[in-house]
Amino acid sequence: MKRVLDLGCGRKKRPGAIGVDCNASVAADIVHDLNQFPYPFEDGEFDEIHLEHVLEHLDDVVRVVEEVFRICRPGGMVKVIVPYFRSHLACMDPTHKHFFTVNSFAYFEPSHPFYERYAYTRARFRVTKIVFNEMLEGRWFKRFVVALANRWPRYYEYYFSQLAPVDTITYDLERCL
């Protein structure tokens, strides 16, 4: 049976997942502060881990990703949804501590030059997909911009994101062995 973990689940815990949140009044199965390490799970315990709008609130992104690496089984999948760095929504929330770009997970991808050059961590993930505004809402122009951004994410980020910013960025990651 597939084991799914929803870190920072809040009131929208995924069906069938184990929900973790620091707020005891939400749908969490386990109340735990995600800034406290280690997380209360065994190594390689989960097949799939979700972090939806939680990573931007935590103190140490690298340490959180290392902990996710530890509790995710080799070959397991991780989905991270965070504010895109150019979004007006990213800066609107005073609890946001971090913002994310197309290359934010390059430091964890062994095939990327950033990982090879800096080697900040032993946590290793392969970025299998990047999607802007995965939960798309908006008018035709926004849908058009998002479609172009998703087709050519790095080109969009370098040349057009300042003119027509999107709101969120989603990373699908695969835990390397």
Image (cartoon, rainbow, N blue to C red):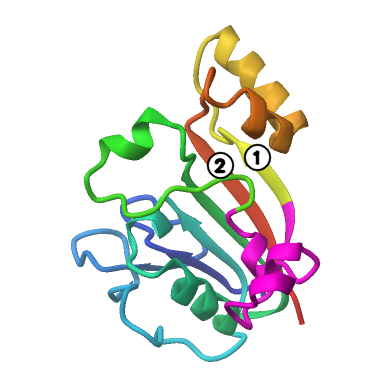
Task: Tell me if residue 31 comes above or below residue 151 in the rendering.
Answer: below
The x and y percentages for residue 65 are 52, 71
| Residue 56 left/right relative to 93 | right
Q: Which residue is mark 1?
A: 131
Query: As rendered, which of 172 and 158 lies closer to the eye?
Result: 158
In the picture, residue 57 is in which quadrant? bottom left
Which quadrant holds the C terminus? bottom right
- Tag count in the figure? 2
| Residue 112 left/right relative to 26 | right
Mark 2 closeness class: few <14, some 14–19, many ≥20 residues within 10 Å: many
Q: Which residue is mark 2?
A: 169
State the residue at coordinates (63%, 66%). Answer: 107
The x and y percentages for residue 15 are 49, 57
Query: As rendered, which of 75 and 144 lies closer to the eye?
Result: 144
Q: Residue furthest bottom?
A: 42
Mark 1 closeness class: few <14, some 14–19, many ≥20 residues within 10 Å: some
Q: Is residue 15 visible?
A: no
Q: Is residue 50 visible?
A: yes
Which quadrant holds the N terminus? bottom right
The x and y percentages for residue 61 are 44, 66
Residue 126 is one of the magenta-drawn residues: yes
In the picture, residue 25 is in which quadrant? bottom left
Residues under numbered marks 1 and 2 in contact, where contact means CB atoms less than 8 Å apart: yes
| Residue 72 left/right relative to 62 | right
The x and y percentages for residue 88 are 37, 29
Which residues make up the magenta segment? 104-128
Residue 6 is one of the magenta-drawn residues: no
Q: Mark 1 vs mark 2: which is more N-terminal?
A: 1
State the residue at coordinates (70%, 35%). Answer: 153
